[in-house]
Image (tube, rainbow, N blue to C red):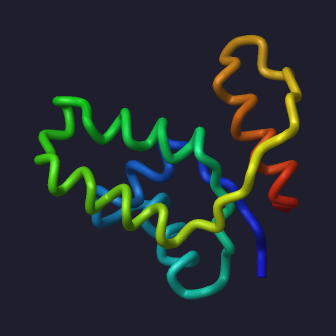
Amino acid sequence: MIKAVFDTNILVSGSIFQVGKPRRLIGYVLGGKIELISSEFIINEFRRIVAKEDFNRSEKEQERLIMFITGISNLVKVVSKFEVVKEDPDDDAIINTAYDGKAQ
């Protein structure tokens, strides 16, 4: 099984929209083809994004989405502190999660 880290855009699109490549990736996780590696940082960023007014989700729906993503994820403790993405340092959290979770 492939271990993979999805960035927040993939998680949001794949959990909210019914079609598209992000949704297909979520399907691979549910089907056991991909082990989704995640971290507290990624889950918190996901929480912040689904709470935006743009998505027009009730608090109950937001919590359901968070529980869904948390439930399909293998949460790892991130201890790495790589700083490689100068343009967007938040992306370093994705790299560190992938490294510590031994993602392919």
For the C terminus, give its image quadrant: bottom right
Find residue 55 and report its image quarter. top left
The residue depicted at 58 percent of the width and 66 percent of the height is 73
- Left or right, 98 with reference to 14: right
Q: Residue extending furthest top? A: 87
Task: Give the x, y percent position of residue 95.
Answer: 79, 39
Q: Does residue 29 lie above or below 70 as drawn?
A: below
Task: Give the x, y percent position of residue 29.
Answer: 57, 76
The residue depicted at 86 percent of the width and 22 percent of the height is 84
Find residue 20 and report its image quarter. bottom left
67 or 2, which is in the foreground?
A: 67
Q: Does residue 72 lie above or below 40 as drawn?
A: below
Find residue 90 and report its image quarter. top right
Task: Give the x, y percent position of residue 53.
Answer: 17, 30
Q: Does residue 28 lie above or below 98 as drawn?
A: below
The residue depicted at 51 percent of the width and 81 percent of the height is 30
For the N terminus, give its image quadrant: bottom right
- Left or right, 104 with reference to 24: right
- Left or right, 103 with reference to 16: right
Task: Give the x, y percent position of residue 4.
Answer: 72, 62
61 or 7, which is in the foreground?
A: 61
Q: How many marks?
A: 0
Q: Residue extending furthest bottom? A: 31
The residue depicted at 77 percent of the width and 74 percent of the height is 2
